[in-house]
Amino acid sequence: MKKIFCYTISFFFINFVASQNVLLQKLNELPTYSLRKMQNEKSDWLLGKVKYASEVFKSQNGKDLIVTNGLLSREFRVQPYFACFSFRNLKTPKEMIRAIQPEAQIEINGASYNVGGVKGQFEYAYMKYDWLEKFTGDSEAFQLKNFEIKNIQTRFPWEAKRWVMDKQWPPKGMEIIFYFESPEKNTAGINVAVHYEIYDGIPLMSKWITVENNSDKEITINSFKNEILSVVEEESVVGGDGHLATPHINVQSDYSFGDMTSKNADHTTYWLPDSLYTSQVNYNLQTPCLLESKPPIGPAYRLQPHQKFEAFHTYELMYDSYDKERCGLAERKMYRTIAPWATENPIFLHLTSTDPKIVKTAVDQCAATGFEMIILSFGSGLDMEDTSDSNIKKIKSLVDYAHSKGIEMGGYSLFSSRSIDAKDDVINPATGKPGGAIFGNAPCLGSEWGLAYLQKLKTFIAKTGFDLLEHDGPYPGDICASTSHPGHDGEDDSQWKQWWLSISFYRELRKKDIYINAPDWYFLNGTNKIAMGYRETDWSLPRDRQVIIERQNIYDGTWNKTPSMGWTFVPLTQYHGGGAAATIEPLSEHLKDYEAHLVQNFGSGVQACYRGPRLFDTPVTEALVKKQVSWYKKYRSILNSDIIHIRRADGRDYDAILHVNPKLKEKGLLMVYNPLDKPITRIIKVPLYYTGITGNAEVGEKEGIKKKHPLDENKNIMLQVSIPANGYNWYLVE
């Protein structure tokens, strides 16, 4: 026994020395880090004038690896142990880390293991660099054996075939992979890799782990933590438990579902108290300054021999300001960078019929006016679960006709918020029976019915040639306690398995460039559009009220979303009641209301669900639609650019938004609206900082003669605008 023990110790010692030599050699191959030149500090990354390229360096002393793009940096001690000791915002500048945590944690077969990390910390309020020499490695944790640096790879294929604002995929930047092995006999053959991606031109990193089972036995990954950070607290308060601000950094993941906002749809970001931080001001040690990125349950994933498990991706966006607009601009750029398909923005009709005559008329009208897509909506009679030859043949003939006219076509399907049967519905863990799901009753995606449902949609889309799926009630995060569903084993793995089924489906559609409307935050896994934000019953209100509420929804919904990421609604025919006072039909009798919807949706770069059987009923109506579509397409690029919020609609005075893009000839386009029954003239402050213009701005009313306006020290101009009664106006900025 003594000989075996000595042999084991010797083996791991020899292996440790060998890996340290490899690490030292690879580290020495990297260029040495030096402070960035000062000109970068003067350039605003949101204006895109400096590349801010991603790079990897070694430290001056040759012990540390530094990942940076000039906007943020992350630093790792590589030997004799591995630990992340710095995460800095280079524009503030602010250090985020106050103490070292393990790189990750993973529970395998019921036992928890750290990945990297140190022992010997004696203070958790702050850390000095020279303390790194006093710490020791965690000998029981997974140990670093190697690392790799490469270009970012595509998570799934996408090539844009329709109009899109941003086409770069994959994003430019670097991936750094750290490979770990365990010294424990119980986890022999199990390797953990910690992946980082850093992106050019934005203070953003992503992180995730993969687990490779090179043993000859099945293992269970009970749980994991992608990220663990002891972050500098946002505020120090003696009392105030439960009401303390969390650190000012945007953390989210692609494990998102169940809501229309990134914040509420993210289920993996936990800001927790740090019990080891005993020198904090808060008497009860409840300051939320320990970040953990982990699934809320499970995944309880059974990893077979020689197979690999991949965690969700955690994204960390550094803010350099507390200004609401600037923080929103940062998040919008994040989504343009890591989900560029969300900048696709086709103009579509929500068709309420599958009658061939009505569909073909609608196709002809779309082609005549410049609309680009038709959605066979709910209530149209479309049933994508019916994959019979007769149904496929009927719908395919309509799709073929649409394609012959240059129009894309797709349709609506509902997954959740309905009941199938006791065998296939989500089983409530509390009762062991159906009921109690997020939407009351819902099918389990891992049930026999759920698996068949996904296959039916794939078959229907492939055989009809559909270009779009409007997927209502996508998987919302239901936990299912069934032990008989073929798609999961039980309660603990049910959420993970259903989520994976969902994103695999969306990624497959993305590969085929199928446009996806889905009212849940699945952008990072391939969906294109979500609701801008609305209550369905608002579209049963009188027409004049709808117009103002719609502008409020657009104003509020574009703080964190680009215009292309959200849809609004126009009830050409009745929707959720309201009768004749709520609808646009007959279209020719309500031209002013129709025009108001067209103008403010196109004018904000937002596409609406124009719901009805047709787009026009008379030549005058046709001319109106054609005119507004033509105007939108002429200025499509600037109208799909970032929105600067000037004044929210309140029915009392003008409201306004400004589109900005420093890369275009038209660097700004101002939309102003007048809800009053009389024409108005106002002098308003127009913030032009994010246009990138310096000195003088040239501004013209519509396409009229442009006049020079000097910018003040804050890059604002004072502009006189005139707006007709219950009307609008627009101004170009160059």
Image (cartoon, rainbow, N blue to C red):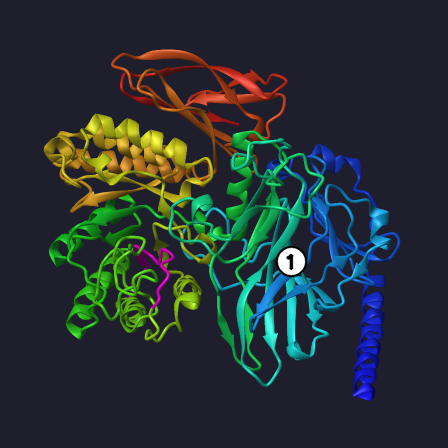
Q: Which residue: 53% across, 42% down?
A: 331
Residue drawn at x 83%, y 47% as measured from the top left:
129
Q: Between residue 196 and residue 154, name the one nearer to us.
A: 196
Identify the residue at image location x=86%, y=48%.
130
Residue 464 is left or right of residue 290, and the answer is left
In the displayed structure, does residue 605 sit left or right of residue 401? right
> In the visual, does 416 lie left or right of 154?
left
Q: Secondary structure at mark 1?
A: strand
* Rendering quarter of residue 120: bottom right
At which x and y percent is residue 234?
Answer: 62, 35
Q: Which x, y percent locates residue 681?
A: 38, 11
Is residue 128 visible in the rendered structure shown here?
Answer: yes
Say if the magenta span includes residue 479: yes
Residue highlighted by disc 1: 196
Q: Residues within 10 Å of mark 1 (few under 14, many from 20)?
A: many
The amino acid on which the numbered mark 1 sits, given as a three-letter code, is Tyr
Q: Is residue 486 above or below residue 43?
A: below
> Range of the magenta residues?
465-481
